[in-house]
Every structure is written in C-alpha cells, then in structure tokens.
C-alpha cells in the first residue's frame, strides 16, 4: 500500500513511518515541520526508495491537492496535530486551526481525490486521535468506543471536533474512514517537553523533576512502537467506519512512573542516585483530568493486536534510548518553550 502519513516527523508519526517501510508499504511523509518535528526521527528509512517527504501544511488545500495528485496514495494516516495540552492552555488558536481546520482540509482534499478516482472502496482515511476526547474517569471503569465524548482541555476539544468531522464525512459522503483513539504514548524520539522525557532529562541533569499536583493522576501508558503496529493493523484490516480504542493495559499514577524511571536511572546512571530526591511537586495543570484507562478489547478480539512490551520493559528501553541519543535531545532542548513551565495562564 502507498500511505500518505501526515505528521510523520513527529513522535508517533515517525514511529509509524519507521514501521511501515519494513512492513512492505510505501510512505509519503507530509509534515509542516513545526517546533515538534524532527526529520532525524525518520533518518533510518529516509534513503529507502519507498520513502518520500513533502514539507506542507495541512491547512494549505492547494498543497494537499498537488500531493494527492502527484503521489496517488492508497490510504491516508492522519496524525499531524498540535499535541501538547499545556501549550493548548496558553495558546488554543493553533490547536483550533491545525486540529480542526486542518483536518477539514485533509478530509476535503482526500474526498476530492477519492471521487476523481471513481470512489474506490478499498481507499482508507485513517484518523488518529486520543482517549482524552472522553474526558476523565473516577477510580473505576474504562473508556470503550461507545463512551460519550466530554473533552476538558482546548487540545482534547479540538481533537474531539476533528473526530466528529471524520465521522460525518463517512456518514454524509461515504468517505471510507477508520478511526483510532489511543492512550498516552512513550518511547524513543518523544519530544523533550512531555512528562517521561522531562523526568529522564531533568534527573540526568540533576535538576528538580516537576510533578503536577500530588502526582496522583493516572494514565494508561502505551509504548510508541506498539502503537505504530496497532495503527498499521487498523489501516490494513480495520472495518469501514469503525473506531478502535488502543491502550497498553498499563495504568499508573504519574508519581509511580516518575519513581520507576528514577529507579532505572539509579542502576543505569548511578551518578546522582538516588534520583527520586529531585522530585518536586508543582502547581497542578488547570482542568487536569484525573484518570484515563482504555478498554482495548475490540482491537484485540477483532484485529488480533496486543501490546508486545510491559510498562517496565518499555520504560527500560526508553531510558536506554535517551542515554544513547544525547545529541538528538540536546538539539531539541534549544527550541522555544522547551524546559519552561507552560499551561498556567488559564
Ligand atoms: N502523544 C500521545 O501520547 C498521543 C496519544 C494519543 C493520540 N495522539 C495523537 O497522535 C498524533 C501524533 O501525536 P504526537 O505525539 O506524535 O505529536 P507531535 O507533536 O510529536 O507531532 C506532530 C507532528 O505534526 C506536524 N504538524 C503540526 N501541525 C501541522 C500542520 N498544520 N501541517 C502539517 N504538519 C503539522 C508537526 O510538525 C509534528 O511533526 C496527534 O494527532 C495526537 O493527537 C497522541
């Protein structure tokens, strides 16, 4: 399959690009190269004859039309988005523009292309979304594909809106779509403003490790390379118009994740041990959802996907990757806003 992947220079998109090529697909990576992008993430496949890169903005309809016409993809995997909740609190405008208007332009460009080709039934528009659209859980229960939407942050509201657009383009125009909603990802190439890289890099530098509130917020963590395999499984085999929740069955409170990482670093990088002495509780994020947990039984039972690593294995691999790839993260730490406390303006 030739797959047009948007956001393929970001964290999850690049994992999909790196996994798609050895799985036998051709890839066109469409990315605007915002602050969150890094082409080094796809260096391992960039010279493959099945790989092409297009620098373009998903809000630029003329560019999208040219790219569809030139590359003639069999499927789209739409990951390009503004993705950082704290940045969405300080500046929601970019999230509305990219996540909502950009998805609208992608849908219209895909629909025009698919219509020109005679509406092939095997075309796929795969929209990648988040479990944050479902809002927050109490101590019990899990999100299923039927959980009502109740987003609480500008980020999750913009993603919820884009999910509704995708569903409507399927119901109204018959565009062949599949949708996925995934829990928090972690792993190699995670941009150094997100929780897990912040913990690793601050611990290595001997700087305070900021933990929002009391660290009791619970997330359901998924190793990014497992997510990439799940997404490729859905674009290859997912049922038309169906949505799939993807999760790792790895619920953990933020403070427990931080302590696990500190314990791994105590072994791998004993200078500065014990690293958990650096933990520093800071003001909570406004509107901070208490708990997310995914019921991933549909994708397991219908498509045969399940995660390949446990949380402990994935965290060890992640810490080892950051220890071995210092130049990658040092370059990104220079980017605007990285290392600053964002998201308190609300
Ligand atoms: N990170 C997570 O834990 C998580 C969990 C579930 C779902 N998701 C979803 O997965 C997708 C990818 O997330 P991520 O963490 O890899 O994000 P990311 O911020 O690391 O990467 C986003 C990529 O999109 C590109 N992009 C942004 N605006 C663009 C525009 N207007 N036009 C073209 N490209 C643009 C950026 O340059 C970047 O390469 C997003 O849709 C996000 O909502 C993320």
Image: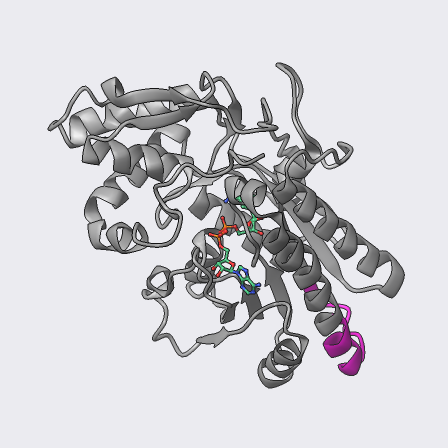
Q: Which residue is rendered at x = 60% and y = 27% of the image?
A: 289
Instruction: Check the image and report above or below for 177 versus 138.
Output: below
Visual colour scheme: one colour
* Residue bounds of the magenta highlight: 111-125
Q: Residue furthest right?
A: 172
Q: Nearer the viewer, residue 154 or 203?
A: 154
Q: Is residue 92 left or right of residue 147?
A: left
Q: Which residue is rendered at x = 56% and y = 52% of the image?
A: 231
Q: Is residue 248 magenta?
A: no
Q: Nearer the viewer, residue 334 or 42?
A: 334
Q: Which residue is rendered at x = 63% and y = 76% of the image?
A: 64
In percent of width and height, residue 304 lies at 59, 43
Kindly indicate the quadrant of the structure image that contains residue 246. Answer: top right
In percent of width and height, residue 290 lies at 58, 22
Q: Is residue 240 visible?
A: no
Q: Which residue is rendered at x = 67% and y = 43% of the image?
A: 244
In percent of width and height, residue 317 lies at 30, 39
Q: Nearer the viewer, residue 66 or 101?
A: 101
In percent of width and height, residue 287 lies at 61, 28
Q: Quadrant of the N terminus?
A: bottom right
Q: Quadrant of the C terminus?
A: top right
Q: How many marks?
A: 0
């Amino acid at each position: 399959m030739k797959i047009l992947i948007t956001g393929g220079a970001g964290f999850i998109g690049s994992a999909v690009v790196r996994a798609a090529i050895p799985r036998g697909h051709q890839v066109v990576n469409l990315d605007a190269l915002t602050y969150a992008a890094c082409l080094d993430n796809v260096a391992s496949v960039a010279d493959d004859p099945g790989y092409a890169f297009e620098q373009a903005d998903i809000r630029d309809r003329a560019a999208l039309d040219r790219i569809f016409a030139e590359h003639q993809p069999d499927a789209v995997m739409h990951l390009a988005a503004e993705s950082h909740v704290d940045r969405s609190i300080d500046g929601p405008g970019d999230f509305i523009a990219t996540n909502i208007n950009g998805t609208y332009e992608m849908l219209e460009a895909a629909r025009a292309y698919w219509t020109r080709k005679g509406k092939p039934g095997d075309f796929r528009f795969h929209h990648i979304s988040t479990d944050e659209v479902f809002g927050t859980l109490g101590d019990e229960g899990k999100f299923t594909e039927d959980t009502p939407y109740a987003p609480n942050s500008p980020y999750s509201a913009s993603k919820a809106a884009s999910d509704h657009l995708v569903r409507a383009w399927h119901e109204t125009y018959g565009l062949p779509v599949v949708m996925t909603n995934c829990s928090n990802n972690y792993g190699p190439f995670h941009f150094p403003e997100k929780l897990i890289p912040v913990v690793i890099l601050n611990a290595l530098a001997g700087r305070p490790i900021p933990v929002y509130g009391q660290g009791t917020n619970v997330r359901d963590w998924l190793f990014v390379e497992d997510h990439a395999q799940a997404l490729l499984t859905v674009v290859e085999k997912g049922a038309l118009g169906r949505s799939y929740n993807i999760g790792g069955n790895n619920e953990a409170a933020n403070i427990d994740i931080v302590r696990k990482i500190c314990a791994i670093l105590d072994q791998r990088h004993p200078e500065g041990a014990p690293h958990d002495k650096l933990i520093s509780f800071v003001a909570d994020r406004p509107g901070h959802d208490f708990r997310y947990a995914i019921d991933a039984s549909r994708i397991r039972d219908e498509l045969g996907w399940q995660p390949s690593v446990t949380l402990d294995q994935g965290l060890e691999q992640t810490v080892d990757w950051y220890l071995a790839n210092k130049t990658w993260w040092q370059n990104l730490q220079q980017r605007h806003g990285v290392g600053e406390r964002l998201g308190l303006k609300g």
